[in-house]
Image (spheres, rainbow, N blue to C red):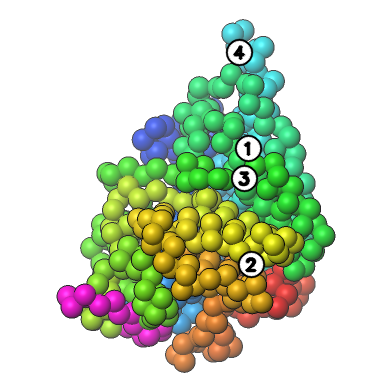
Amino acid sequence: MKKIFAILTIGLSMTACVNEDINTDPNSAYTTVPGSLITYAQKELSDYTNTPSVNENNFRLTMQYWQETTYVNESNYDFTNRNVSNQIFSDNYVNVLNNLGQAKKIIEAYSPTATEVNAWPKNKKNQLAIIDILQVYTFQLLVDTFGNVPYTQAANLTQYPLPAYDDAATIYQDLITRINSDIANLDTSAAGFPSFDTGDKYYSGNIAKWRVFANSLKLKLGIAIADSNPTLAQTTALDAITAGVMTSPADNGKLTYLAASPNYNPLYENVVASGRDDFFAAKTLVDYMNASSDPRLSAYYHPLDDGTFVGQVVGQGGELGDFSYVGDFATTPTTPGNILTYTEVAFYIAEANARWNAGAAAAAYNTAVTASILEWGGDAADATAYLAAKPYDAANWKKSIGEEAWVAMYNQALVSWNFWRRLDFPALLAPATAINNAGGKVPVRMAYPVLEQQTNNTNYKAASTAIGGDLLTTKLFWDKF
């Protein structure tokens, strides 16, 4: 990371949180138990993937789920005005990866007590594997956002204050190697380690759950490279499915937020607690769902007084009362923060079958769509009726899966962005008012942070050249079509 992050890294590490209440002040990162750092990193990761803050995560706007009411810069792809990419780097490299790295160091240096010593080898391997799984997840997120990023020299400011950028495809291959090793190292026979388990806010140290999560993440990694490295993609994805991925919402990787500040969901923070009315429905999704009589519509948005659902044209502002407001999930402080969900995994399975086992694709598609409808409060009858109107089209499977994944990933916009770039459906159009550097298209990557240009310019230039230009229109290595 850049030098400017050195101060942030130390500061965040020294104040990195927490106990069961998520934000209780901890001891120094160099003396505290690793569970405190795990909690902090998990919350920061969840906050980033779930926030609608225009300063750091605008993908609900990019994927045309929401539209801004007044300040429409980000809806028109102006991400430099608020230095959005700077915040994405800080969120993930500093707040997440740095603290996970510090936790690893503490575990490696730990001397178990006499009562812990016999169980320590298994517990140590489990703890290190869980941390590494979170690192793999975070690095994939960064690669999927920018392309080439700092990797082998990342989160090591002492040795690499100005890190080089690694090739994105090579990073992916290494992430798959790492996740395979992590899965092998998870040992369900371990007794558990209380101080670590209480710090793990996703699964409370449940190794069986972490193994399912890791296999599901492996599936996600495999599907992502299906068009760029089909052999590795197929082996990785099918191995993960065989080993055991998520099979119900009980497997979801998520953070349970609390009702009180500062531990409520960042959706609530930005939509309610801020006292601002910045968002309402975007026309693109609302029109699609209206045309489909989608049973999820009333969960996604509030109707107007006349009972209709109306979205604003993407890129344009408007009066709040003229367009449908966001649904109750966004105004509820305890809405869980999704990291990886059963519905998401079900769509990966549908895509895997469409690519490599066509005879099972229709059933897998039905399962995925049904999972989403049930997730948002519908029932089996709703799913059956919806699927009758939206059956799987084997001749155009990318459209079937792409459009339905777009609808289903409404509250996981980063995931939705990946599906859209990989499958090229739905056919999203950029607003006529979009800024010129978007090239009249919906962005397919984020530009590198301005701070990287200023402080790590040599490596920034090399990375920009390697990927074909630091543009919103430069496709990632896996985005082939």
Secondary structure at numbered mark 4: loop
- Residue 185 position in % (x across, y down): 71, 32
Q: Height in image: 443 above or below 239?
A: below
Q: Which residue is at the front of the view, 243 or 64?
A: 243
Outermost residue toward the top in this view? 114
Q: Residue furthest left?
A: 305
Q: Nearer the viewer, mark 1 or mark 4?
A: 1
| Mark 1 and mark 4: Cα distance apart in space | 23 Å
Among the two numbered marks 4 and 2 on one chain, the one whose residue lies closer to the N terminus: 4
Q: How much space separates mark 2 and mark 1, taking CA atoms?
A: 28 Å
Q: Earlier in the sequence, mark 1 or mark 4?
A: 4
Residue wearing tag 1: 211
Provide the residue designation for mark 4. 116
86 or 2, nearer to the observer? 86
- At label 4, counting other C-alpha atoms closer than 10 Å, the crowd grade (few under 14, some 14-19, many 20 or more) is few
Q: Which residue is mark 2?
A: 146
Q: Which marked residue is nearer to the observer: mark 2 or mark 3? A: 3
Instruction: Give percent across and percent down for residue 303.
Output: 24, 72
The image shows residue 281 at horizontal and vertical percentages of 34, 74
**Is residue 229 inside the magenta stretch?**
no
For the record, the magenta segment spans 304-317
Label 3: how many residues lie within 10 Å, few (<14), some (14-19) or many (20+)?
A: many
Amino acid type at image mark 4: Glu
Q: Residues within 10 Å of mark 2 (few under 14, many from 20)?
A: many
